[in-house]
Amino acid sequence: MNCPQAQALLQPYVDGELDLVNTLAVEEHLQTCTACRQMQRSLLTLQEAISGEALYYKAPAQLQKRLQLAIRDANQRAPDRPRLPAFRLPVFQGSGAFQQWRWVSVAAALVIVALVGWGVGYTQHTATLDDALAQEVLASHVRSLMATHLTDVASSDHHTVKPWFDGKLDFAPNVQDLAQTGFPLVGGRLDYLDGRPVAALVYQHGAHFINLFSWPSSGADTAPRVNVSQGYNLIQWRQAGMTYWAVSDMSADELQGFVKLQQQTVTATPTTYK
C-alpha cells in the first residue's frame, strides 16, 4: 500500500469503520511512513476536539410519538412474534440545525431498520456467524502473505508436511501434493480459527497462493459454497468429519477446480487424537 492509498483510508480507519483486511494494510503502512502517521495523529486530535462539544439537542416529541405508534402497530399485526420494545429517542450531541436533524434522521432510520430486521426472523443470525468466520479466514490468509509467514514447514513432499503436524494438532490433516494438476504443495503451518488450532496447507497456482484451512467438524457433509470478499474468493465445505476453507485471489472457477481436486482425495473420516 502506498501513501495515497493509505491516506484515502485514514479517516475510516480512525473512525473504526474499515474491514479487517484494509485495517491490517493501513497499520502495516503506518509502521514505516512518518508522513501518514502524522496525518493519523492530526485526525485523532480533530476527532477528540469534536467529541468534546457540549451542545445537545432533544428530538421533537412528535417524532418520538410517531415511532412509538409504529412499534405498537407492528406488535398488534404480528402478536405471535417476539414483541418489539418501547422506543424512546435519546438526546443527541451535535451543533447547528443541520447537525441536530441529521442525528434525528439517523435515529429514525435505525428504528426502521429494526422493524425490518425483526420481521426477517432468526436465519440472519447464522449468516452473520458465517460472515464473521469468513472474515477470520480471509484475515489469516492476508496476514500469511503480508508477514512473510506463509509456512512453518516448507516442502512440496506430503510425507514431510503431514508428519510435521503430529503432536501439534488433535487430528491428522489430509495433505496431498497436487503438482501434476497445476497446484503444487508449498508447505503448511499452524493457525487459529473458530476458537481452535487448525491446519493451514499452502498451495500455489501460477503467481497465486492458496490457503487451505481444515479442522474437525461434527456437522453433516455440505456442498462447497463460494464467498467473495475484498477481491478474494473463499470456498467453504464440510466433508468426512472435517470443515474446509480454501481462500485465494485467483478466479472463482480456478479455486473451484482446486476444491474439486481436494474433495477427490478425501476418502474417509480423518484420524483424530484424544
Image: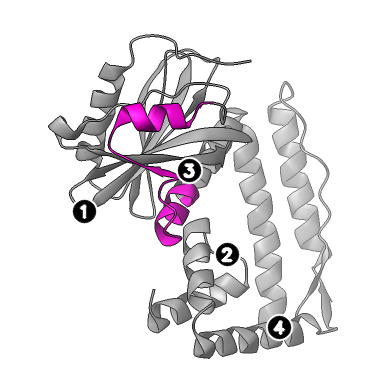
Give the residue pinned by disc 1.
Answer: 207
Q: CA distance from mark 4 to mark 2?
A: 26 Å
Q: Quadrant of the C terminus?
A: top right
- Secondary structure beneath dot 2 equals loop
Q: CA distance from mark 4 to mark 3?
A: 45 Å
Give the residue pinned by disc 2.
Answer: 17
Q: Which quadrant of the view contains residue 90?
A: bottom right
- Secondary structure beneath dot 3 equals helix
Q: CA distance from mark 3 to mark 1?
A: 20 Å
Amino acid tagged 2: Glu
Q: Residue at x 38, y 79 (%)?
A: 2
Q: Residues within 10 Å of mark 4 (few under 14, many from 20)?
A: few
Give the residue pinned by disc 4.
Answer: 97
Q: CA distance from mark 1 to mark 2?
A: 31 Å
Q: Which is nearer the N-term, disc 3 or disc 1?
A: 3
Give the residue pinned by disc 3.
Answer: 137
Amino acid tagged 4: Ala
Q: Position of residue 238 (x, y in %)?
A: 43, 21
**Image coloring type:** one colour
Residue 95 visible to the viewer = no
Do the numbered discs 1 and 4 sit on residues whose CB atoms are within 8 Å?
no
**Of labels 1 and 2, the one closer to you:** 1
Camera-side residue of 28 and 274: 274
205 falls in the magenta region: no
Q: Which quadrant of the view contains residue 60?
A: bottom right
